[in-house]
Amino acid sequence: MADTIYALSSGRPPAAVSIIRVSGPAAHVAGERIAGSLPATRMAAVRELRHPRSGDLLDEALVLRFDSPASSTGENIVEFQCHGGRAVVDSVLRALGLIPELREAQPGEFTRRAFENGRIDLTEAEGLADLIEAETESQRKAALALAEGGLRRQIEAWQQALLALSAQAERAIDYDEEDEAIDPALVDGCAKLAAELRSWLSRPRIEPLKDGIRVVVAGPPNAGKSSLLNAIAGQERAIVTDVPGTTRDHIEVPLSLGGIPILLTDTAGLRETADVVEAIGVSRTESLVERADILLWLGESNEAPAHAEVVLVHSKVDVRGGAPEGSLGVSSVTGEGLAALLEVVATRAKALLPSEDAIALNRRQAALVEEAAELLEGLPTDTVLVAETLRLARQAFDRLTGRAGVEDVLDALFSRFCLGK
């Protein structure tokens, strides 16, 4: 039998109201020990919360009861919505800790129980984790699409299609002649499903939305890279001097640009150098340039690295004069051209992100969809082997939803949740 767990499920006090949750087989008994009689299931009632041993009044709170399996965790639940002062919350938590059947929950344990009891699947749990960590509107919308089961419903449709194909293969094994070729309809069905999976794999991934679009500022020494970063960030984050090679290592500044998460990175100037420390910085710059989603190049246009998303920036336009054709003139001192540059960056960044109404895959999900697609594209010539291939594809979807083979990812996922979630 599972333990009964409890924790503060709202923000840390002080607050107007704090929610303390108890979940597990002894939840209702514990609720009665603290609040006396409980209200009817899914109803709320005001109760006096009292110490389970001394009977001292702890607080007057709104109490809710949920019965298994129709609860967020799939277990019996009691919630106390009490006053949000530190002393009140601490006294109720201490009182619950005195009840022998209860223990304090671990971070993410309520959500993990919801997953283990079939209330949510792994993709929805991943969406909840992303929702908790969301800092921009785009991140919130993408996380909510996952948390509300958008990907789960799509996977269910794929699984139903696979089951139909598997049944078709099994019928062929039972009734077709041994030397007869594989049913063309079966091959066509697998090809269509594989094509649909490929269309999902071609969509932008969720990681740039979660981690931020990597915008790297690069160029030769004294090109104005650090000044540009400071101007965009609106604060002095990088040291600016007239001495070439001042920036020895990269500096990262997370920003939100029109609701789009950006990771703006200043880098060491690219040049040949005998200075050991500066040389390390130059090497890191080269690596950052390769991994950049968008590259702001502040050097000569003919010296710009080969990159799919390079923006040519003519810096110090207030001193150097107008920008050559194909470059954006910018002054970090006067602010000239900054708005136009940010508009270009925002437009390119938006194109690299999933649209707000689309469900985006993370790396784990994409790898399993890729595995299923490859299996469907590489069908063997024997019907028995085709049936086995379809079974392996179904296993990939089971790992995608968390039905099988995901023990190695569960601890890492639920550790991202806060205590009480």
Image: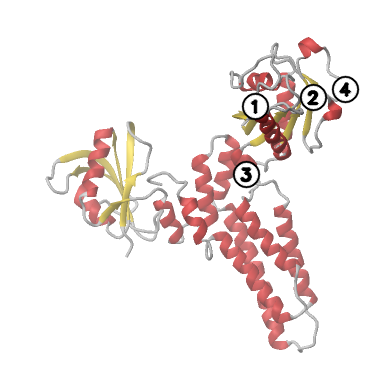
The label number, if any, that marks residue 299 in the structure image: 2
Q: How is the image coloured?
A: secondary structure
The residue tagged 3 is 207
Judged left or right of residue 333, residue 414 is left
The location of residue 353, given as percent across then percent down, is 68, 41
Between circles 4 and 2, the one closer to the viewer is: 2
Q: Amino acid at mark 1?
A: Arg
- Name the one closer to the observer, 95 or 245: 245
The label number, if any, that marks residue 325 in the structure image: 4
Between circles 3 and 1, the one closer to the viewer is: 1
Q: Is residue 5 above or below residue 9?
A: below
Q: Earlier in the sequence, mark 3 or mark 1?
A: 3
Judged left or right of residue 415, residue 372 is right
User: Quick one: SS at disc 1?
Assistant: loop
User: Quick one: SS at disc 3?
Assistant: helix
The location of residue 207, given as percent across then percent down, is 62, 44
Q: Earlier in the sequence, mark 2 or mark 3?
A: 3
The residue at the point 53 percent across, 53 percent down is: 124
Instruction: Find the distance from the CA under tag 2 to the CA under tag 3.
Output: 29 Å
Instruction: Find the distance from the CA under tag 3 to the CA under tag 1.
Output: 28 Å
Q: Earlier in the sequence, mark 2 or mark 1?
A: 1
Q: How many C-alpha atoms fall within 10 Å of the one at disc 1: few (<14), some, or many (≥20)? A: some
The residue tagged 1 is 248
